[in-house]
Image (cartoon, rainbow, N blue to C red):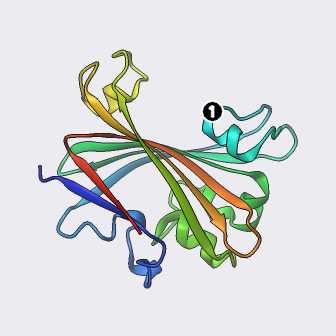
Amino acid sequence: MQLIFINRTMTGRAERADQRGVYADVPGVEVTTDVSSTAMVGGTIGGDAAAIFGDVNWLNNAGTVRRRVASAQGVPFQVSTTVFPPEVVTAAPQIAQQDTGAGGFLSRLEDAGFELGHSAQLTYASAGDLDKNSVSVKLTVERGDALWREVWTVQDVTSGQTLAVTESFYPAHLVGFSYA
């Protein structure tokens, strides 16, 4: 499989409805995704999403968590978890569905009237224990193999509201990044 470069940019999404989300800029690569969306009711969020959203309890108003495994030519290259707060799900309810439509959740946020901006932090990580739920199993890498870990935050430029937080893992030997 060829090395995949992911270009993180909002301005490159000029024709959002015709694009495959953030993979539109990967020419000649057929990307398939296995997605699960879960309404998150009855608890608090953790990890990077909690640090960004603050102490949010979604007991009475469900947020949504989308988990994805993306593959190219049958080889998994991304495991991602995206968290959306309840008010964003209310404004753009299609993001809680399995199929968010052309352009993915970014286009649904734009359809809801948000002007998108983003920030990202890319760090180096290594694959953890090989248990049935681990990132390393989903990416078919060995314990200790190099991974990229990206925390990507999407905001509404006008209000500054955080709309989504995504944590993703990628095998470092298969994926590179550029940010604009």
Q: Position of residue 23 (x, y in %)?
A: 34, 64
The quadrant in which residue 39 appears is top right
Could you say which is closer to the camera, residue 168 or residue 146? 146
Q: Residue furthest right?
A: 60
Q: Is residue 79 above or below residue 15?
A: above
SS at mark 1 in the image? helix
Could you say which is closer to the camera, residue 90 or residue 160? 160
113 left or right of 145 in image: right
Name the residue located 39 percent from the left edge and 80 percent from the top edge. 18
Please tell me how crowded label 1 is: few (under 14), some (14-19), or many (20+) other residues with Cα within 10 Å: few
Amino acid residing under circle 1: Gly
Query: Label 1: which residue?
Result: 47
Q: Position of residue 123 (x, y in %)?
A: 41, 40
Q: Position of residue 153 (x, y in %)?
A: 58, 55
Q: Is residue 161 above or below residue 58?
A: below
Q: Is residue 93 above or below residue 57?
A: below
Name the residue located 61 percent from the left edge and 38 percent from the top edge. 48
134 left or right of 141 in image: right
